[in-house]
């Protein structure tokens, strides 16, 4: 039998993830000769061997690739035999302007965990242990190529032992850029809130004692600071709520291990896989009955749980702690703290001690948040462990999309790849805006992108407008809900007209009103608004978002007009109601809205669940939480046909709800019936639109689809009516996905100009 030779090119996330040593290993195992190297266009492999061995090698290449790698494409060419006599790892070639992919930050692997728990290992209890398969990546990279001196590990010169591992292709730390050990790597410090070093033998052990005593700590982690306290200590949790000015918004927790999670939450098989996987997001789980967590996620049937993902976390939980509050280390409304000086300054009023270290975070990144609905993981916040994995789409030029006002992400693209940024936050203050600007400049530099087009919302906030004005490039305006639907289409690879159902809180419409309960017919370029919920007024504008009872009054006014005696709301005086009616009648600060979020708010307030909110979406979330009951009834509604648009009239829905309240029907049942009704009128609307436009695909997007009852119900009902239904998975359905829609729409609009 003769030997054969093949030349293989592998594209995808194949750099800085242990790909070459992996290739080296499978080459030796299969008796292959030749070489492997790294180029800006991917990994090149020249292989020679007997046919069977070559095929086995190629099979292993596809099936056993390292956990952090993601093979996008493999090209294989036949070549003339060269008779190589060994297999070697060649030096990397210089960057020539291609795209290099960056791995997300990844949780500590089992091998490294074993080492830090092994008394005989020289990395025993070392909090910065990592290897080729785990540890920081995206958050420490300053520039490409991904090499130690281009990361925040530059100041730490590797000791002999570490550099030996780094250079050895058969070592599991071969080219692990953040490689470190107690002798040469970063260190951890415990400080009090006056910045004095706490004298102790072991900072981590001492920190745990402080936590057990009810103290609140600021802990520097992988992508930023967390505020940490003992989740079982009610006073500590209440204290944290007071100091962080956060009365109700759920806190995320970190639990010792999967066994502990199962003690407090219901965990399905797929949920267990996500919790224990390499990305370690905060996963929303159904709470079991326990008196433990009433002040952690009040009025909420879910709990956000993650497992330890850095060596520091592992070591904390070794000291007899079971559940820790692990919430973003920021001052209310501001971005996550990630630099030591700034954190010391800004967090000292909130916390008692700092557990910090001297490995800098270059790019801050929050914890990701996801939830399993319809049997699959669906991201709510796409950040650590997920960003900056790119999205591939043919025909995309160098473009920058600015995203939304709240839950901002931006997107930047080049050569058929779109890089969706990590979660940035609400662009409501200069600090978050600076965080955004730093992110944009970093992505431009690291991927070497000079955007030729800029895409932004039809109503960009003033901070972003400032940024836009500076640049002399083509500018494209994109409607918010069109962007939502296109983000869902892109994620599902749909490039034909769809019925887009966009349900959210707020988005600027092209009639100058506030949209949010929209049915659009759209493609990647254009949209036509074909239906929506009836407009009502938002008395007080933004204040109506914060105070859902105002929306209840507005919906009641829509129904009863001047019949003042019909208005009744829990904990609201008739004087307050009359004032709102005056505003509505005089049209004083009363923008009009078709928002689904505001409809949920109104119902929540009508049922006496929530009159004023302290975090975004609270009224709707609490309404969903109580609606988890069996009831099939649907309230009456009408779909009116006016000026080519279909309008969903909510009058009868409100009337039915009030009748149910009058008859003392359990508010849980009413909440469920309201959910049933939203699902039902959406399906009816889709059927009307299918009839009119002969389109039978529907794409669902917008923050309301974080609601499990709505998403599951609408998805199943539409399938039953023979629609093709597209929903989100890797891209958040909320405004975190807006920039992806914007970038694609802008490219399609620019094509013919
Ligand atoms: Zn590792
Ligand atoms: Zn070392
Ligand atoms: Fe939105």
Image (cartoon, helix red, strand yellow):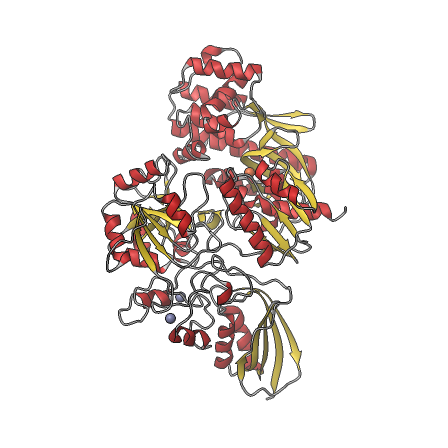
**Do we see residue 328 in this rendering?**
no
Q: Which of the pair 331/636 is nearer the observer?
A: 331
Give coordinates of residue 250: x percent, y percent. 38, 40
Note whether residue 604 is visible: yes
From the viewer's perspective, is residue 585 above or below residue 213? Answer: above
Quarter of the image that includes the N terminus: bottom right
Given the current orientation, which residue lies at the most extreme right position?
Answer: 753
Asked whether, in this view, residue 203 is left or right of residue 675, the answer is: left
* Tag count: 0
Determine the image quadrant of residue 97: bottom right
Query: Where in the image, quadrant-wise, is ligand 3 located?
Result: top right
| Picture layout, residue 56 above or below residue 260 | below
The quarter holding residue 201 reads bottom left
Residue 573: image quadrant is top left
Q: Residue at x 42, y 16 (%)?
A: 568
Q: Position of residue 641 (x, y in %)?
A: 66, 25
Foreground residue, 163 or 670?
A: 163
Q: Nearer the viewer, residue 64 or 192?
A: 192
């Amino acid at each position: 039998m003769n030997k054969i030779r093949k030349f293989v090119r592998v594209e995808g996330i194949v750099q800085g993830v242990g790909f070459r040593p992996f290739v080296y290993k499978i080459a030796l195992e299969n008796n292959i000769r030749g070489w492997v190297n790294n180029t800006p266009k991917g990994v090149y492999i020249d292989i020679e061997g007997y046919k069977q061995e070559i095929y086995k090698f190629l099979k292993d290449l596809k099936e056993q690739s390292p956990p952090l790698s993601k093979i996008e494409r493999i090209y294989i060419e036949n070549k003339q035999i060269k008779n190589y006599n060994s297999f070697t790892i060649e030096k990397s070639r210089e960057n020539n302007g291609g795209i290099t992919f960056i791995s997300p930050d990844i949780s500590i692997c089992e091998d490294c965990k074993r080492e830090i728990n092994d008394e005989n290992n020289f990395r025993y209890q070392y909090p910065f242990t990592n290897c080729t398969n785990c540890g920081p990546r995206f958050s420490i990279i300053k520039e490409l190529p991904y090499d130690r001196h281009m990361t925040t590990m530059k100041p730490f010169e590797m000791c002999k032992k570490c550099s030996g591992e780094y250079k050895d292709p058969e070592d599991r730390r071969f080219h692990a850029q953040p490689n470190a050990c107690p002798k040469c790597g970063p260190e951890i410090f415990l400080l009090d809130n006056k910045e004095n070093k706490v004298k102790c033998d072991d900072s981590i052990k001492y920190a745990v004692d402080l936590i057990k005593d009810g103290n609140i700590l600021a802990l520097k982690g992988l992508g930023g600071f967390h505020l940490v306290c003992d989740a079982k200590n009610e006073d500590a949790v209440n204290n944290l709520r007071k100091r962080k000015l956060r009365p109700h918004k759920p806190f995320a927790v970190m639990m010792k291990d999967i066994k502990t999670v199962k003690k407090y939450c219901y965990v399905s098989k797929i949920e267990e896989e996500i919790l224990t996987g390499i990305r370690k997001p905060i996963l929303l789980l159904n709470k079991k009955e326990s008196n433990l967590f009433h002040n952690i996620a009040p009025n909420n049937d879910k709990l956000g749980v993650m497992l330890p993902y850095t060596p520091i976390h592992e070591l904390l939980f070794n000291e007899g702690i079971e559940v820790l509050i692990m919430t973003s280390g920021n001052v209310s409304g501001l971005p996550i703290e990630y630099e030591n000086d700034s954190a010391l300054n800004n967090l000292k009023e909130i916390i008692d001690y700092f557990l910090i270290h001297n490995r800098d975070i270059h790019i801050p990144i929050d914890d990701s948040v996801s939830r399993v609905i319809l049997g699959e993981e669906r991201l709510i916040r796409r950040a650590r462990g997920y960003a900056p994995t790119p999205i591939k789409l043919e025909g995309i030029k160098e473009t920058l999309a600015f995203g939304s006002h709240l839950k901002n992400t931006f997107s930047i693209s080049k050569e058929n790849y779109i890089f969706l940024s990590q979660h940035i936050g609400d662009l409501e203050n200069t600090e978050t805006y600076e965080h955004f600007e730093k992110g944009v400049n970093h992505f431009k530099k690291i991927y070497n992108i000079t955007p030729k087009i800029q895409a932004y919302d039809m109503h960009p906030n003033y901070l972003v407008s400032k940024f836009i004005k500076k640049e002399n490039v083509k500018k494209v305006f994109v409607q918010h809900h069109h962007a939502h639907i296109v983000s869902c289409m892109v994620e599902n690879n749909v490039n034909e007209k769809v019925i887009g159902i966009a349900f959210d809180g707020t988005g600027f419409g092209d009639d100058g009103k506030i949209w949010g309960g929209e049915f659009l017919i759209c493609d990647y370029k254009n949209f036509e608004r074909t239906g929506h919920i009836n407009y009502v007024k938002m008395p007080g504008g933004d204040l109506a978002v914060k105070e859902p009872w105002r929306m209840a009054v507005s919906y009641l006014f829509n129904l009863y007009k001047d019949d003042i005696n019909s208005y009744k709301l829990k904990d609201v005086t008739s004087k307050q109601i009359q004032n709102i009616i005056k505003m509505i009648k005089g049209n004083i600060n009363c923008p009009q809205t078709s928002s689904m979020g505001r409809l949920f708010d109104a119902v929540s307030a009508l049922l006496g669940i929530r009159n004023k909110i302290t975090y975004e979406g609270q009224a709707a979330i609490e309404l969903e939480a109580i609606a988890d009951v069996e009831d099939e009834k649907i309230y009456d509604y009408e779909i009116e046909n006016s000026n080519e648009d279909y309008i969903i009239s909510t009058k009868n829905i409100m009337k039915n709800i009030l009748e149910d309240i009058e008859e003392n029907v359990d508010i849980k049942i009413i909440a469920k019936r309201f959910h049933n009704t939203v699902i039902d009128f959406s399906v009816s609307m889709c059927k009307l639109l299918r009839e009119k436009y002969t389109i039978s695909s529907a794409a669902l997007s917008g923050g309301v689809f974080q609601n499990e009852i709505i998403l599951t119900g609408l998805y199943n009902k539409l399938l039953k009516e023979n629609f093709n239904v597209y929903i989100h998975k890797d891209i958040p359905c909320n405004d975190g996905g807006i920039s992806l829609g914007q970038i694609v729409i802008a490219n399609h609009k620019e094509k013919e100009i």
